[in-house]
């Protein structure tokens, strides 16, 4: 095993992901998640949901591939939301697991985070997998709090709403400025403009704007339909009314924010880095994911200089979150909806 691992490291290269790699990278991503989740057909695990091409097109300079003997065998993606960064999906072809490839794919991500001067960074991963948690802890990411990821049908209302796509160019510029002011009030330096532009530019959905008192009170960047990061509708579910059974348009609003909230210790949640089905996902900082029951994030905040040795503490914590209402998100916590006992590393003088 040691010889095989060393051989893999010698022949593997980490390089920027290219357009021509997307089909292979998508196949590896689906196979990896489907195999880990025990899906009968790993390639069908996410249906028509797309996590690879959408992330790549949003930021081609923040996507990397692991190449072994001329073939793409893994990939990783980083996203910057101003002062907050996250990464994923990070995947490796199953027959090459446990050979250090995931660790190598973390190297360009950590270098990017360091160059961006972030206030905080994170990811999602599986809470029941010591292997996943161990990998990310090597890079300074630690589990935080329980964070159920919830959803409900979208219903009409009397709210004063508009959409980004319906605005004129001048109105869009004003809307982006208002959004930056709102997100900065929620978390200093948080900036969702890149996400908004990606959704609009790729026709992945729309950004819904909530107005109150003549100003912007909240917004949500939403993915909708096939080929986006919206969760696919179940093909086995019964139709909700008369007529033929068909796939309804799925929607996922991944970046809700509202001005009236107190400034949280962490920013609004980013898109999922490890999407899944009914299996809970653990995370390392903040993200919104496909339909899951709960999530566990690991947060990494640049440390405050201190002369006191860090202390490790464990506490039992539980929290609720209602993303649709833009409530404060706490980092996901465990595989159950009940209390969990995450450990996190704290240094004296640091929040």
Image (cartoon, rainbow, N blue to C red):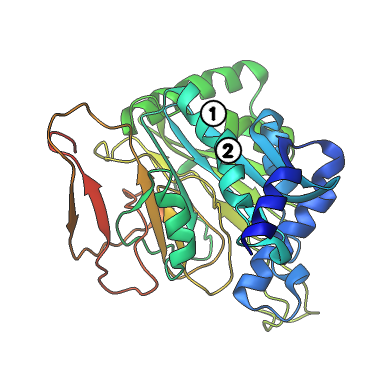
Q: Say which quarter of the image contains residue 20.
A: top right
- Dot 2 crowding, Cα within 10 Å, few <14, some 14–19, many 20+: many
At horizontal 27% and vertical 40% (from top left) the residue drawn is 264
Q: Position of residue 184 (x, y in %)?
A: 37, 26
Secondary structure under badge 1?
Answer: helix
At horizontal 69% and vertical 59% (from top left) the residue drawn is 4
At horizontal 77% and vertical 79% (from top left) the residue drawn is 245
In screen coordinates, is 129 left or right of 195?
Answer: left
Q: Which residue is mark 2?
A: 78
Q: Position of residue 120 (x, y in %)?
A: 37, 35
Reply above or below: 124 against 232: above
In screen coordinates, is 152 left or right of 306?
Answer: right
Viewer-proximal residue, 337 or 340? 340
At horizontal 71% and vertical 48% (from top left) the residue drawn is 52
Viewer-proximal residue, 284 or 332? 284
In screen coordinates, is 189 left or right of 26?
Answer: left
Q: Mark 1, mark 2: which one is toward the viewer?
A: 1
- Dot 1 crowding, Cα within 10 Å, few <14, some 14–19, many 20+: some
Viewer-proximal residue, 98 or 82? 98
Q: Which residue is mark 1?
A: 112
Whether residue 151 is visible to the viewer of this picture, yes or no, is: no
Cα gap from disc 1 to disc 2, whole angstroms:
8 Å
Q: Position of residue 133 (x, y in %)?
A: 43, 59
Q: Which mark is residue 202?
A: none
Q: CB of mark 1 within 8 Å of CB of mark 2?
A: yes
């Amino acid at each position: 095993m040691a010889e095989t691992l060393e051989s893999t490291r010698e022949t593997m290269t980490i390089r920027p992901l290219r357009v021509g790699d997307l089909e292979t990278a998508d196949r590896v991503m689906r196979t990896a998640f489907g195999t880990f989740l025990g899906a009968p057909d790993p390639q069908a695990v996410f249906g028509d949901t797309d996590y690879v091409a959408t992330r790549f097109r949003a930021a081609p300079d923040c996507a990397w591939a692991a190449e072994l003997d001329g073939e793409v065998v893994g990939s990783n993606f980083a996203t910057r939301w101003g002062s907050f960064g996250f990464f994923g999906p990070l995947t490796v072809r199953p027959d090459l697991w446990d050979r250090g490839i995931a660790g190598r794919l973390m190297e360009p991500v950590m270098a990017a985070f360091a160059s961006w001067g972030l206030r905080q960074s994170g990811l999602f991963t599986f809470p029941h997998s010591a292997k996943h948690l161990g990998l990310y802890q090597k890079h300074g990411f630690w589990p935080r709090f329980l964070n159920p990821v919830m959803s409900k049908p979208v219903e009409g209302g009397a709210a004063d709403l508009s959409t980004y796509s319906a605005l004129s160019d001048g109105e869009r510029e004003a809307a982006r400025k208002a959004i930056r002011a709102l997100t900065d009030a929620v978390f200093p330096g948080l900036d969702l403009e890149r996400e908004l532009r990606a959704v609009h530019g790729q026709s992945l959905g729309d950004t819904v704007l909530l107005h109150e008192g003549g100003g912007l009170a909240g917004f949500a960047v939403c993915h909708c339909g096939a080929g986006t990061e919206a969760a696919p509708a179940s093909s086995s579910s019964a139709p909700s009314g008369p007529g033929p059974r068909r796939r309804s348009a799925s929607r996922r609003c991944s970046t809700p924010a509202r001005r009236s909230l107190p400034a949280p210790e962490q920013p609004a949640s980013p898109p999922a880095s490890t999407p899944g089905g009914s299996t809970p996902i653990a995370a390392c900082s903040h993200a919104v994911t496909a339909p899951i029951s709960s999530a566990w994030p690991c947060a990494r905040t640049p440390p405050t200089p201190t002369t006191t040795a860090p202390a490790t503490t464990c506490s039992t914590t539980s929290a609720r979150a209602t993303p649709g209402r833009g409530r404060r998100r706490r980092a996901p916590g465990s595989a159950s909806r009940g209390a969990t006992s995450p450990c996190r590393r704290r240094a004296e003088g640091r929040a």
